[in-house]
Amino acid sequence: MGLSAAIFVNKEFKGRNFVRLILYMPIMISGVIMGAIQYYIFNYENGVLNNILNLFGVGNIYWMETGPRAVMIITLINSWQAMGFCMLIYLAGLQNIPKMYQEAALLDGATKRQIFFKVKLPLLMPAVTTAVITNLIGGFKLYDIIVTLTNGGPNRKSLSLSYYISLLYFSDEKAGYSSAVGIALFVIIFLVAVPINHYLRSREVEY
């Protein structure tokens, strides 16, 4: 989503800076406030979505009835909120690519699709590495949106490890278990992030 937005706002058109601002705005809202806003959108009673459906004669839908559905909604909201941050990273990468490479590819008869995948994307790999690793770690540490949107429900099926650590310590009063899960979270992030970072950096090219 961030890469698509960056490609779009990198083009010359009227109102481009305004579009950039609109796409970036969600990341300026804290996760707690974003979760609270989305709660009133997806709420079963008097939620915005259900109120709209009621106008067309459709009954209320329990949007977060199951754990997978709640996780999907949380993922979509978090992805939308992080899109603006990724857009800035990719936009900086796109504007840092020398135009001579694209012009040389055009002279060789390359299509726009070939230019993107054979020229732009390889040169964008440093930006891809930064965006992927940052959002990967942020996803593992996700906490605030879950607290205000689902509170871990239904039946703790939409918990993140960060929120689970909080519940273990403050609600279940299991300080030792909470510490152990915290260490496990660090190990998981390390074991996942390091190989991905190494792979993405190996795909980078110099120019």
Image: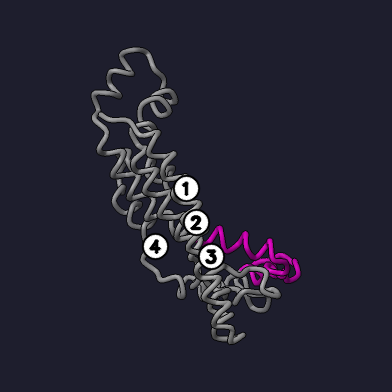
Mark 2 and 1 residues: CB-CB less than 8 Å, in contact? yes
Closer to us: 12 or 180? 180
Main structural element of the magenta stretch: helix, strand or loop? helix
* Residue labelled with disc 2: 79
**Of the image marks 4 and 1, the number of the one nearer the N terminus:** 1
Marking on residue 150: none
Marking on residue 1: 1
Task: Identify the amino acid type marked 4.
Answer: Ile
Which residue is pictured at 59% across the width and 77% down the height? 151
Task: Please tell me in which quadrant of the rendered image residue 98 appears.
Answer: top left
Q: What element carries label 3?
A: helix
**Of the image marks 3 and 4, the number of the one nearer the N terminus:** 4
Task: Identify the amino acid type marked 1.
Answer: Met
Mark 4 and 2 residues: CB-CB less than 8 Å, in contact? no
Distance in Å between CA atoms under marks 2 and 1: 8 Å
Please tell me whether residue 76 belongs to the stretch shown in magenta. yes
Which residue is pictured at 51% across the width and 61% down the height? 140
* Residue labelled with disc 3: 184
Left or right: 22 in relation to 184: left
Q: Where is residue 82 in the image (x, y as percent from the top left)?
A: 43, 57
Distance in Å between CA atoms under marks 1 and 3: 30 Å
**Image quadrant for the C terminus?**
top left
Marking on residue 27: 4
Q: What element carries label 1?
A: loop
Task: Identify the amino acid type marked 2.
Answer: Ser
Which residue is pictured at 68% across the width and 61% down the height? 68
Q: Position of residue 188 (x, y in %)?
A: 52, 58
Q: Which of marks 3 and 4 is in front?
A: 3
What's the magenta region?
49-78
Mark 3 and 2 residues: CB-CB less than 8 Å, in contact? no
